[in-house]
Image: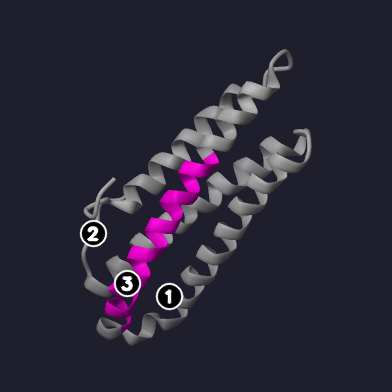
Amino acid sequence: MGENTDWRMELSKAGVGLQELLSEGMPADNPDDWVQRLEDKLGQLSRALTGFCSDCDLGLYDDCIELAPRLVPQVNKIRSEQVQLQASVQQQIQRLHTQQPDPGLQQSMAAIVHKVDQLNHHAVDLVYSAYDTDLGGPG
């Protein structure tokens, strides 16, 4: 992935990939392989989230605020959501390294997928509000 990476799209793809893995469910006979794939998907999500946040913080949010100062609270909320989501992803990666998978694992991963989707929608809505331009996100 180079300089021209569409991190919003990569974030969306990573969320979908994680959701697909979760829909398979953890097999009782070979959970180690599934957990390794889960860790890989979380790594992809973490990289996409970092890229997405970096791109947004490199001027997009500032541009939105400059165009529409009324959006400061929304920008602050999204930035807070980004930090919380990054922390959640890192906690889940650590959790996979330090303990055996438990029944709550899939539920906590599903919550992360939901938060990724929300973050993506909030960012699209923010840009739409600032530029009065539809970026064509899902939904």
| Mark 2 residue element | loop
Type of amino acid at the residue the image marks with label 2: Asp
Colouring style: one colour
Q: Mark 2 and mark 3 in contact? Answer it, CB < 8 Å.
A: no
Q: Position of residue 5 (x, y in %)?
A: 26, 50
From the viewer's perspective, tell me whether residue 124 is left or right of residue 95. left
Q: Which mark is residue 58?
A: 3
At 68% across and 40% down in the image, what residue appears? 107
Instruction: Please tell me which of labels 1 and 2 falls first in the chain.
Output: 1
From the viewer's perspective, tell me whether residue 42 is left or right of residue 60. right
| Mark 3 residue element | helix
| Residue indicated by mark 2 | 134
Q: CA distance from mark 2 to mark 3?
A: 21 Å
| Residue indicated by mark 1 | 75
**Where does the magenta region start and end?**
42-65
Give neighbour class at mark 3: few <14, some 14-19, many 20+ (Cα, 10 Å). few
Give neighbour class at mark 2: few <14, some 14-19, many 20+ (Cα, 10 Å). few
Question: Could you say which quadrant of the image residue 65 lies in?
Answer: bottom left
**Residue 58 sits above or below residue 110 on the image:** below
